[in-house]
Image (cartoon, rainbow, N blue to C red):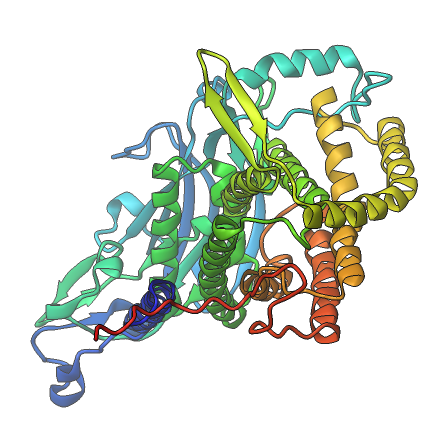
Amino acid sequence: MLPRRSSLTGLAVGLFAVYVAHTCWVMYGIVHTRPCLAAARDGEGSDGCIRPYLARRPKLQLSVYTTTRSNIGTENNIDLVLNVENFDVESKFERTVNVSVPKKTRNNGTLYAYIFLHHAGVLPWHDGKQVHIVSPLTTYMVPKPEEINLLTGESITQQIEAEKKQTYALDEPVSHWRSRLTLNVMVEDFVFDGSSLPADVHRYMKMVQLGKTVHYLPILFIDQLSNRVKDLIIINRSTTELPLTVSYDKISLGKLRFWIHMQDAVYSLQQFGFSEKDADEVKGIFVDTNLYFLALTFFVAAFHLLFDFLAFKNDISFWKKKKSMIGMSTKAVLWRCFSTVIIFLFLLDEQTSLLVLIPAGVGAVIELWKVKKALKMTIEWGGLIPAVKFGAFTESEKKTEEYDTQAMKYLSYLLYPLCIGGAVYSLLNIRYKSWYSWLINSFVNGVYAFGFLFMLPQLFVNYKMKSVAHLPWKAFTYKAFNTFIDDIFAFIITMPTSHRLACFRDDVVFLVYLYQRWLYPVDKSRVNEYGESYEEKPKRKPHKQ
């Protein structure tokens, strides 16, 4: 019978393989659409095939209107902001126009853009073959607090009085202007099979009967993934005009279907409680990344998820069975817990993407549990106030503690002045939202810049004991893989610069651990000087005579 832990690892790897295979199959189904085979066999009069109206090469016109109403039936109470005559679906363009902002919109109302694609020289309302799509040009979001100099009280652009006035409005979301509108038209002369229309494209299609054949009108699409938080502009009561950049580019059928699915995924995240900023981080992965690199990122992310699970599993399993702290740096465990919690609070204060925040929070909880194990803490409830007790250390553990204290003594001469100096410098030269923000930033900058020094006590203990057998090498291996994967994500997911640099710093630390692994080879079957063997073999029951 296989050990339970091996079966769990095998199950995780098996589920991972099934997940990757299923995702590849789904992606293939998205980018590859089956054409109508009867069209090639029977010609123009084939039944069941839906042909592109663009194949008839009609003369088209693009018109963009704005209105405060979500539904319009006539041309009343609407403003024409862009009119492109002799619109060529193959030609890419970008134009910036000024849009009048109605009073209703300035009072936290919504302004909509109506984009019409219709025959040239004919008003959209008089064209039976026009297609249109609607998109809000405003969104609601809590504005980011302005940062000030904590000593002088001055902000970057205004004095403290104006800053106080702005802070008063931060309690509730305000209307923001979407300064970009990205349009696409599917230009492939693709003939669909009417009996198996893809559901994702079907909702964007409008069909007309021309003689004996059915045609679908041009598929007009708004790229919502291009609406980024960095392009938003706050709308105040004095705003009368705002710029709107309208850009157009053709799109293939495969990319159109992929983009529809991605937009639906982002919308689902927002329905589950993701904020505009969280959704924006996901958008950035798709919009700012080459599609081939994006495919590579998917596989890298899948492996990252697998290694994260295996690292957590083996780390928890190692510490759960850990009865002694021989060879383990207690201060390194305490520092790792402190730094993980500080990093989590920093990411929370910076309103970082949940893609980064959630794993950091899980890691902080695990590190707190490790501290409880390392200090042999027990909590006893004798009433409303719990009593915390610490276990006794053996002579061998005390010897390890001496090495640990000796290493920390030398490090403190270098570490503390650097951290204090960095905190004072940032207070004098950098602006923050609050004193709490400065405190968290000072701590986290110390963690990121000099935190790797606190990993040195464990290296020093390994050097003194000439052994690394006491370390959780399985968890280290998975974490090492994830560290190199994090290097890739450091260029994809938006995160603070200090957090990005820390990913590369961890590479160096793992290389040093690997060097010690090579320098002090482990014979797991040998009983060490503490009477322990690190090779765990399942006990067999004696045979009955």
Up-down: is 331 above or below 256?
above
The residue at 75%/27% (across/down) is 438
Can residue 237 be seen at all in this image of the molecule?
no
Q: Nearer the viewer, residue 517 or 23?
A: 517
Q: On the rendered image, what quadrant is the C terminus found in? A: bottom left
Q: Position of residue 136 (x, y in %)?
A: 41, 37
Q: Nearer the viewer, residue 97 or 467?
A: 467
The residue at 27%/43% (across/down) is 125
Up-down: is 525 above or below 330?
below
Q: Quadrant of residue 418?
A: top right
Query: Would residue 38 appear left or right of 98 to someone viewing this image?
Result: left
The residue at 79%/62% (across/down) is 463
Q: Position of residue 246 (x, y in %)?
A: 52, 49
Q: Position of residue 185 (x, y in %)?
A: 38, 61
Residue at the front extreme, as displayed: 545
Up-down: is 253 above or below 330?
below
Q: Nearer the viewer, residue 22 or 34?
A: 22
Can residue 43 be seen at all in this image of the molecule?
yes
Query: Would residue 427 appear left or right of 220 to someone viewing this image?
Result: right
Query: Would residue 539 appear left or right of 137 to someone viewing this image?
Result: left
Up-down: is 278 above or below 423?
below
Q: On the rendered image, what quadrant is the N terminus found in? A: bottom left
Q: Quadrant of residue 412?
A: top right
Residue at the bottom extreme, as displayed: 41
The residue at 84%/48% (across/down) is 407
Q: How many numbered marks appear?
A: 0
Q: Position of residue 187 (x, y in %)?
A: 37, 69
Q: Quadrant of residue 544?
A: bottom left
